[in-house]
């Protein structure tokens, strides 16, 4: 139970931090946070993105977030500066709730790695 409470506390902290910084305190959903991580990983926050690029940014974020779990590995950066990953292990079939927990754990690990939370 401690792990579940710790996960919730850290997730709430991240949600508060990022919602305050990017959405005037209104809570962002997990997809918005994944998008922002994609923008961070691209390293070009001032660009305007079209719909396909926004999808690509979310893909970059998911790959980066799941890389420590062994699902993806960074491959290269293309001539436009976009990172590319290759699949190492196929993702397991997860129920929606399980997917959400995995992504929240991955986001928490990302924020800890970036030293934005402890």
Image (cartoon, grey):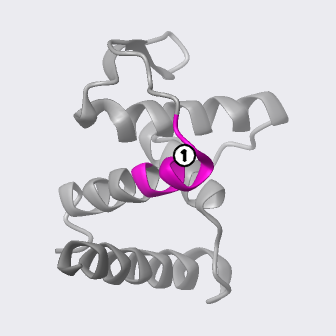
The quarter of the picture where the C terminus appears is: bottom left
Left or right of residue 77, residue 114 in this image: left
Q: Position of residue 19 (x, y in %)?
A: 57, 79
The vertical placement of 68 against 34, above or below, is above
Left or right of residue 69, residue 53 in this image: right
Q: Which residues are magenta?
A: 94-102
Q: Position of residue 14 (x, y in %)?
A: 41, 75
Q: Nearer the viewer, residue 91 or 42?
A: 91
Say which residue label 1 marks. 39
Q: Which image quarter: residue 71? A: top left
- Residue found at x 44% / y 25%: 91
Q: Residues within 10 Å of mark 1 (few under 14, many from 20)?
A: many
Left or right of residue 2, residue 50 in this image: right
The vertical placement of 14 against 106, above or below, is below
- Residue found at x 67% / y 43%: 47
The quarter of the picture where the N terminus appears is: bottom left
Q: Nearer the viewer, residue 28 or 76?
A: 28
The vertical placement of 6 against 83, above or below, is below
- Residue found at x 53% / y 41%: 44
Q: Which SS does the magenta portion mostly show?
A: helix
Q: Is residue 2 magenta?
A: no
Q: Position of residue 36 (x, y in %)?
A: 55, 54
Q: Nearer the viewer, residue 100 or 72?
A: 100
């Amino acid at each position: 139970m401690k792990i579940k409470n710790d996960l919730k506390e850290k997730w709430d902290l991240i949600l508060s931090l990022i919602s305050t910084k990017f959405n005037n305190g209104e809570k962002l959903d997990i997809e918005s946070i994944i998008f922002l991580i994609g923008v961070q990983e691209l390293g070009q926050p001032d660009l305007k993105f079209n719909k396909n690029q926004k999808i690509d940014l979310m893909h970059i974020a998911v790959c980066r977030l799941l890389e420590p779990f062994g699902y993806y590995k960074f491959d290269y950066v293309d001539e436009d500066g976009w990172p590319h990953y290759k699949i190492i292990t196929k993702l397991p079939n997860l129920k929606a709730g399980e997917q959400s927990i995995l992504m929240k754990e991955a986001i928490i690990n990302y924020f800890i790695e970036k030293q934005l939370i402890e």
